[in-house]
Amino acid sequence: MKNNFRKNTLSEIIKNEINEDATIIQEVEFPSNNNQYKIYVKREDLLHPKISGNKWRKLKYNLLEADKQNVNTLLTFGGAYSNHIHATAYAGKIFGFNTIGIIRGEEHLPINPTLSDAQKCGMKIHYVNRSDYRKKRDESFINSLRNKFGEFYLVPEGGTNNLAVKGCTEIVKDININFDYILTACGTGGTISGVIAELDGNKNVIGVPVLKGAGFLNNEITEYVKAYSGKTYSNWNLALDYHHGGYAKVTKELVLFIKEFEKLNNIPLDPIYTGKLMFALNDMIKLKHFSKGSTIIVLHTGGLQGIKGMENRINKLLS
Ligand SMILES: *Cc1c(COP(=O)(O)O)cnc(C)c1O
């Protein structure tokens, strides 16, 4: 099990592969802004061409921990279009881990682009039905997976755990401009938890959940932040009404906005996370949600691989 097949240490390989300096701050325009606010995107999507954005931040310290434990296989959970499954598969290939993806639901053929990429990276794909998938945190279910697949390092669904929160604190560490607000899309809430913890009560943090009925995230995020930092903060809130019908649901309004944003700024967005986030920010500007003259940072958390799996639906909406 010893990872002595790597010629360099894992941290050296990470330094060579991942360019954290690429996550530049770029000024952007919003259709509704009219010079009211200074708005910048932090380009986490530029960290790496395959392991993009916050999924890398969440994996980094988990990979280092697996390496420290001399465990050479990663096992994780996700939906069939999951950015996290995709990122974990590429991370396995690049950093020398075997990977196993436990996928929610039955197999659908032909295999979709996300899972096909993952498989090409060497990920072993294992489908489980929805009721078994719900047991993803149960010890007995995890043990049955250990019996089946042998020893592995468990990365939870969406990649979110305490080490993931630690990685996400680094998203804000290198921001060198003064700002008043910072916004991010939320799935499990791991990313925003790192941002909140690192800002230590400063600035205003706004999360835009992409799931319907995501009020439960208020507690989850509070717990993630507390587990990492030992503290509880009140300088953050969630905008719960920008899910466009639910996870991976898209509306024509959303798709048209994404096209308009891309034309204005020449920055691609995905319809699942960053599209909904930018749509929400555009709406908040319209509603004068921010104090006058504010500077706003919005995180581009990556996720562009997810576009391929949605192209048919997007084209149908536009036709
Ligand atoms: C997974 C993902 C998110 C959500 O991150 P959480 O830490 O789960 O809240 C946001 N944006 C993109 C592009 C993602 O892939």
Image (cartoon, rainbow, N blue to C red):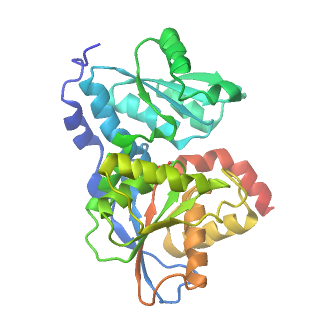
| Nearer-the-camera pick, 123 or 106 | 106
Q: Where is residue 109 in the image (x, y as percent from the top left)?
A: 72, 27
Residue 45 appears in the picture as rendered = no
Relative to residue 103, is residue 214 depicted above or below? below
Q: Is residue 226 visible?
A: yes
Q: Residue at x 54, y 46 (%)?
A: 305
* Residue 192 position within the rendered picture, expressed as x and y whole percent measured from the top left: 43, 57
Viewer-nearest residue: 256 or 128: 128
How many callouts does the rendering have? 0
Where on the picture, by quarter, is residue 274? bottom right
Residue beneath the point at 44% across and 49% down:
223
Which residue: 45% across, 90% down?
292
Q: As displayed, is residue 15 above or below residue 252?
A: above
In the rendered image, residue 99, in percent from the top left (x then y), is placed at 45, 24
- Image quadrant where residue 256 sits: bottom right
Image quadrant for the C terminus? Answer: bottom right
Dividing the image into 4 quarters, which one contains the N terminus?
top left
Hey, which quadrant is residue 77 in on the image? top right
Q: Where is residue 53 in the image (x, y as percent from the top left)?
A: 42, 51
Up-down relation of residue 222 to residue 62 (above or below): below
